[in-house]
Image: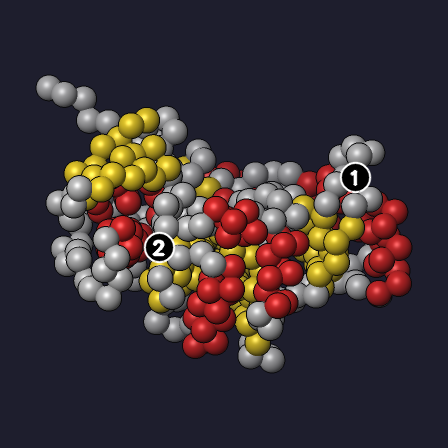
């Protein structure tokens, strides 16, 4: 029996399966590098993971640089948190003092999965604990200092100027049972069947690190703290799924301005398929664009922790096939494939 080849990335596998389900000739060229070849109506093209041939390279380069993204959003009059580019710790401290920016966010101009993103920094003392991670060497490093905006964190999946799905991302947290310590609750969370070692499942582990320690210090507690029953303790500021956040499908209930802003941002950057990260301030009813992703995860929409499943992979396949045959005004795929579901397991129990 021929061995079934699987891609290493769950999102890539969902897209590959959607091509197969649509009756398209799809081949896995390299499972390790998530490379697939698609042949359709006499044309052949490649997809690597969630890097899509319909996205122009310059637009991908812009999306991968948060400073350039902000420059383009500004030209398009799209709202985003006030941002400043710095290259050294000295520049950062001087700018913060001059602008009186606390509370603030500091992060590299390039990066993904919420790595080295530090939010809600409220003092110079707190900044001094973090700044070495942003500027690890004496060499100049591009970093952004942003105003801190509180609100609901949304990932909006845009395909061809239409919203395919919206996920509300909730930062890594645990819920107390009145008995277990925070350390024990995190261990229990990490053992959930929905939690993967990396990105092969819809949830990721909560890792004990300096950011968790910073969050707990702000609350005056540590990992030995026993939370009261049903007490919610947030462990990180950023809501990325890759840092232990959880996803709730919000496709049908997110404010309209969230969808509208995401579509405008995708058009401004020039990405046909993208995941747009948006903070929605419920008090002001304003939507702020944080960044755009040219290689967005798909699986979080197929396997939400709560809410309805959104079959984003089929929407992607339909758009790519139409784009490759200049038939964007026609619907090609009609069948939605049946993907393997993860176990229906409660997150905290």
Q: Nearer the viewer, residue 244 or 284?
A: 284
Q: Is residue 87 left or right of residue 111?
A: right
Residue 257 to residue 131: above or below: below
Q: Nearer the viewer, mark 1 or mark 2?
A: 1
Q: Quadrant of the N terminus?
A: top left
Name, please, the residue furthest toward the left: 1
Indicate the position of residue 198 as horizontal and vertical percent values: 45, 35
Q: At 14% across and 21% down in the image, what residue appears? A: 2
Q: Is residue 28 left or right of residue 59?
A: left
Instruction: Write down the residue under mark 1.
Output: 140
Q: Which mark is residue 210?
A: none
Q: Check disc 2: other Cα within 10 Å, few if <14, some if 14-19, many if 20+.
A: many
Task: Give the residue drawn at x 37%, y 37%.
Answer: 48
Provide the secondary structure element on which disc 2 rests. helix
Q: Give the quarter of the image for residue 253.
A: bottom left
The mark tally for this picture is 2
Q: Position of residue 27 (x, y in %)?
A: 22, 32
Q: Which residue is mark 2?
A: 301
Residue at x-position 89% and y-position 55%: 94
How far apart are the alpha carbons under marks 1 and 2?
Answer: 38 Å
């Amino acid at each position: 029996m021929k061995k079934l080849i699987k891609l290493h990335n769950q999102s890539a596998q969902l897209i590959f399966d959607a091509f197969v389900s649509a009756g398209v000739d799809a081949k896995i060229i390299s499972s390790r590098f998530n490379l697939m070849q698609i042949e359709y109506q006499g044309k052949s093209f490649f997809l690597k993971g969630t890097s899509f041939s319909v996205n122009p390279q310059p637009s991908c380069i812009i999306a991968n640089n948060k400073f350039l993204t902000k420059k383009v959003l500004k030209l398009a009059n799209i709202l985003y948190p006030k941002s400043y580019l710095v290259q050294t710790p000295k520049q950062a401290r001087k700018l913060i003092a001059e602008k009186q920016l606390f509370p603030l966010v500091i992060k590299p101009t390039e990066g993904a999965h919420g790595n080295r993103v530090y939010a809600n920094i409220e003092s110079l003392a707190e900044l001094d604990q973090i700044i070495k991670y942003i500027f690890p060497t004496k060499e100049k490093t591009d970093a952004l200092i942003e105003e801190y905006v509180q609100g609901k964190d949304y990932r909006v999946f845009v395909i061809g100027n239409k919203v395919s799905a919206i996920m509300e991302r909730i930062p890594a947290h645990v819920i107390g049972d009145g008995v277990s310590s925070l350390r024990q609750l995190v261990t229990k969370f990490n053992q959930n069947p929905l939690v993967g070692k990396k990105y092969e499942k819809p949830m990721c582990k909560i890792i004990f690190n300096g950011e968790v320690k910073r969050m707990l210090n702000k609350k005056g507690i540590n990992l030995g703290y026993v939370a009261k029953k049903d007490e919610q303790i947030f462990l990180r500021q950023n809501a990325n799924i890759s840092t232990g956040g959880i996803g709730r499908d919000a496709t049908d209930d997110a404010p309209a301005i969230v969808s509208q802003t995401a579509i405008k941002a995708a058009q401004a950057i020039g990405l046909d398929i993208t995941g747009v990260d948006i903070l929605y301030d419920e008090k002001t009813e304003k939507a702020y664009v944080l960044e755009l992703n040219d290689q967005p995860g798909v699986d979080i929409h197929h396997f939400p922790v709560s809410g309805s499943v959104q079959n984003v992979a089929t929407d992607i396949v339909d758009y790519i096939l139409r784009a490759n045959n200049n038939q964007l005004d026609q619907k090609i795929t009609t069948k939605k494939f049946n993907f393997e579901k993860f176990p229906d397991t409660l997150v905290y129990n």
